[in-house]
Image: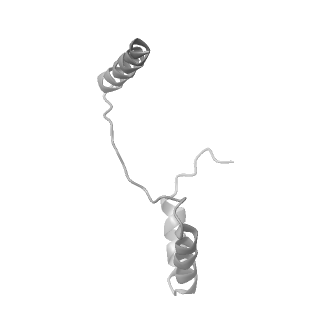
Amino acid sequence: MASRSGGVAQRVQKHREALRAAGLRPVQIWVPDTRRAGFAAECRRQCLALRKGRSEADHLKWLASVADTEGWK
């Protein structure tokens, strides 16, 4: 079984080397855990706070201007 996992490790390493050769590099990012308890409630709280704010229209206008929706149906 060790030889099988060794083969996988070699394929992964080869793939990563090819990506680096293509000019790419690995990046690790941390994002909010959408499965965490309270996540949906916090999203709702923030949305309601924005909705009640005077600058809602400005925020929506800004979002529309920066959104990349090319190719969306």
The vertical placement of 73 against 32, above or below, is above
Residue at the spot 58% in from the left edge and 81% down from the top edge: 48
State the residue in front, 62 or 44: 44
The vertical placement of 18 against 62, above or below, is above
Residue 24 spot, x, y in % from top left: 33, 31
The vertical placement of 15 against 55, above or below, is above
Name the residue at the front extreme: 1
Residue 1 spot, x, y in % from top left: 44, 15
Residue 7 spot, x, y in % from top left: 40, 14
**Labels in figure, total:** 0
Residue at the spot 33% in from the left edge and 36% down from the top edge: 26
Quadrant in the rendering for residue 15 = top left
Quadrant in the rendering for residue 11 = top left
State the residue in front, 32 or 2: 2
Left or right, 63 with respect to 72, comes to: left
Quadrant in the rendering for residue 44 = bottom right
Name the residue at the top extreme: 3
Residue 23 spot, x, y in % from top left: 30, 28
Residue at the spot 54% in from the left edge and 63% down from the top edge: 64
Left or right, 71 with respect to 30, comes to: right
State the residue in front, 45 or 9: 9
- Colour setting: one colour
